[in-house]
Amino acid sequence: IVGALSPPELAEQKKTLHAGADGSIWQDSQTLADALEHIVTEVAVNCADQISLGRSKRAELCIDRETGCIRLWNDGRIPIEKHPQRTDLYNAEVIYGLMNSSSNYSDAAKAKNNQFTGGRNGIGAKATNILSKRFTVACADAELGLQLVATWHDGMTVADGAKVKTLKSSQKHSSVCV
């Protein structure tokens, strides 16, 4: 259950702490619908998981108040290549757009590698996709020199198909915009 789809009229504002890249810390207040907060948290947990697994060093959350886009970004790498089991789709399309496609199932494997992650069973980001009017994934793979953009619409019922082209920088990243 994700909660209310719109903020209650008399909702209590939540205090949020922010940390800037320059070491600054500030606080602001916001009123969010419970559902929006939950689905954004699902993707934010994925970014945090990448850091805890050593696959990423930095993550960012940006909210564009004009467009309503919420973008979550990390400097991790999703290889831009066809998925080994679903050769008609790229890895990012499987990760974000195909149910039951996670590799994060085994508690024993996580315990063996001393890993702590928040995500489980690959549902969170896909649930965010399902609950979004528009969901876009952008990846830059410096190792392969490629960039990918894939967009879904109307609750993951329409997929534009991944668009892949040559990467013009040497950076790697993954981002989600909902």
Image (cartoon, helix red, strand yellow):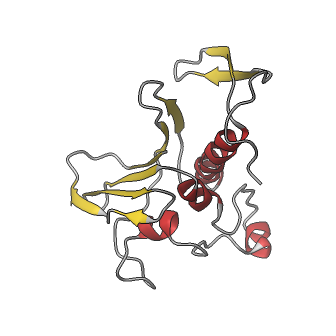
- Residue 26 in view here: yes
| Left or right for 38, reference 69 | right
> In the image, what residue occupies the spot 71% across and 64% down?
120
Q: Position of residue 109 (x, y in %)?
A: 73, 74
Left-right relation of 124 to 110? left
Residue 51 in the image, given as x and y percentages of width and height: 60, 48
Give residue 163's position: percent from left, percent from top: 26, 61
Residue 54 seen from this side = no
Image quarter of residue 110: bottom right
Q: Position of residue 84 (x, y in %)?
A: 42, 83
Residue displayed at 35% across by 76% down: 82
132 versus 12 height, above or below:
below
Task: Name the residue: 52% across, 18% down.
Answer: 22
Q: Nearer the viewer, residue 103 or 111?
A: 103
Residue at the front extreme, as displayed: 9
Question: Is residue 78 left or right of 6 when viewed as pictured?
Answer: left
Q: Is residue 22 left or right of residue 25?
A: left
Q: Quadrant of residue 33?
A: top right
The quarter in which the N terminus is drawn is bottom right
Number of numbered callouts drawn: 0
